[in-house]
Image (spheres, grey):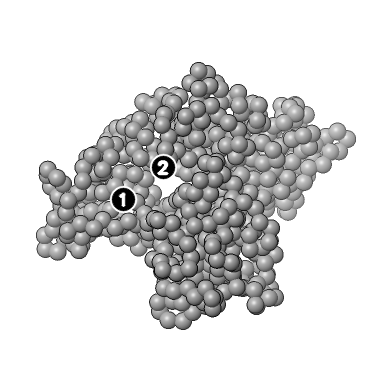
Amino acid sequence: KLFPKFFLISMDDTRILLEVPRNELDQLGDHGMKQFVTPDGEILLIKEKGNYFAIGAKCSHYGAPLSKGVLSKGRIRCPWHGACFDVQTGDIEDYPGLDSLPKFDVTIVDGRIVVKGTRDSLMRHKRRKCIMTDIISLDESVVIVGGGPAAETCLETLRFNGFNGRIILVSSEKHLPYDRTKLSKNMDSPVCSIFLRSYTYYEDGQIELLLNREVVRVDFSERLVSFASGGDVRFKKLVFATGTKPRPLCLPGNQYENIFYLRSPEDAHKISENATNKKVVIIGNSFIGMETAAYLVTKVSEVTVIGRSSVPYEKALGKLVGERLQKFFEEKGVKFKGSCVPVKFVGEDGKVSGIQLEDEILNCDVCIVGIGVMPATEFLKGSEIKLNENGYIEVDEYLSTNIDCVYACGDVTSFPLFCKNNDKVSIGHFQMAQSHGKTVALSIHGTSQPIKSVPFFWTAFFGKSLRFSGYNVGHDTVILQGNLEDLVFAVFYCVGDSVVAVATMNMDPLAAEFAELIHQQVTIKSSMLKEDPNYLKQLCKIHLVNNGA
């Protein structure tokens, strides 16, 4: 029987054996990849340096088709959010995402390419590595303070690499680690739907969970972490992954009810419950504020976004992109007030009733504040740990702090960014936090690798998604390709003659290609990009292999 793109040789309840048709095989050329369909799922066949490999065809993060991604030097980068997978093993090498891909055996029989594997692997587009272990060394203990993606990736990487000592996860939240990026995109989601892992997963991995524990003190000489509720825990190695918290807006009237910050699932649920059919003002016109506005606009009577900048996203993405996205949001019913400064909250009967600006009062029933974040390091101030002037933990390229056997990872750090001449930066991306978690785990394990991950983030609203790759702080010029009006564009950010970042909409896999070029430390010249719109494609042909179909 012929299934699309694959000949089925044999199949039983557990195994499947398939042959690649010769005409399809020829399309791979010397280097390339192609997705093939089977009765139970899809397989990605890769040819690189004369060798054939077969892995799952969908990214383990959000299910993107990897055949549309970037193949280069033994790995594939996802076209949507930049996750990377090893073509030989299917292992996840860079993030976002937690799981690897299923791997299938490829053999050559009488000149024919035969792929075999389990039907279960085909039906599941992701492969979850087992972290089951027996605790052998009770004296070897790693305490991880924090409950986000950096902490999660750190503990999993430790177990994957054979660490069989105690791992103790300490979190100030009462929930298992969860995907905080989803809070502003779907505020009604039950918290269990955004957990990164299940309780069973932690039990299998012998991970000790100390939830709802606020750390108030760390004694580095005695190696003790103390809690506000009393008690402490001893560590051999310590990891700070506490992330950030919302920056408060300290104005008169901030004691009124119905003024919200978005940090936890409980915050999201309260906002959604209280805002329904009400008049809402959102203070802050960057990512959190805009995603919240996009979610609420069809559920409230009116939503207005106010910000200090003239247009939304101006600081992060520039005025060019901000102006077009504001227009797009306005078409969906969101109102804006830019270049304005709130003076105080106005209230009535103990509840907020408006926001006093310099020249008017904006009436509202609910106010949501999203004006940025600050590092969650109050408990470390005055301690031996080195913090920078903004309160972020200083680390080196291995994410070690100034104290032996103490590490930090994720949003809470100031770390050297390889693609910015190792200047110290703080980046609040889910993907970067995961990369940090892996780096710390390898440092603890004794197989240290310097952090070398290209910043990659995304935002979603009204069925659209914007991708961003690189680091554009301090850029001096931008180059536009595509059509802003149609929301099919790429905006390149430049410093001098170097292109340092790109923001794209409906231009996949351009952001992934850009990230891979930066990862390989390819110089992208702005002068060449201005002269030749195909310049980036030419660089990709020289440095990357992308024959996906």
Q: How many marks?
A: 2
Q: Residue at x 39, y 49 (%)?
A: 185
Residue type at numbered disc 1:
Ile
Q: Between residues 386 and 340, which one lies in front from this camera angle?
A: 386
Image coordinates of residue 282 in percent, x first then y, are 26, 49
In the picture shown, does residue 457 fall above or below 210? above
What is the C-alpha distance between the residues marked 2 and 1? 19 Å
Q: Residue furthest top?
A: 531
In the picture shown, does residue 506 fall above or below 126? above
Q: Secondary structure at mark 2?
A: strand
Q: Quadrant of the N terminus?
A: top right
Image coordinates of residue 365 in percent, x first then y, are 18, 54
Q: Residue at x 41, y 24 (%)?
A: 483
Image coordinates of residue 167 in percent, x first then y, are 59, 70
Res. 298 image quadrant: top left
Q: Is residue 226 left or right of residue 399?
A: left
Q: Residue at x 79, y 40 (%)?
A: 114
Q: Between residues 227 and 169, which one lies in front from this camera angle?
A: 227
Q: Nearer the viewer, mark 2 or mark 1?
A: 1
Q: Secondary structure at mark 1?
A: loop
Query: Is mark 2 in CB contact (under 8 Å) with mark 1?
Result: no
Residue type at numbered disc 2:
Ala
Q: Quadrant of the C terminus?
A: top right
Image coordinates of residue 215 in percent, x first then y, are 44, 72
Answer with mark 2 or mark 1, whichever residue precedes in sequence.
1
Please say whether residue 334 is visible from this viewpoint.
no
Please say whether residue 229 is visible from this viewpoint.
yes
State the residue position of label 2. 460
Q: Residue furthest bottom?
A: 231
Q: Residue at x 50, y 31 (%)?
A: 499
State the residue position of label 1. 371
Q: Is residue 516 left or right of residue 363?
A: right
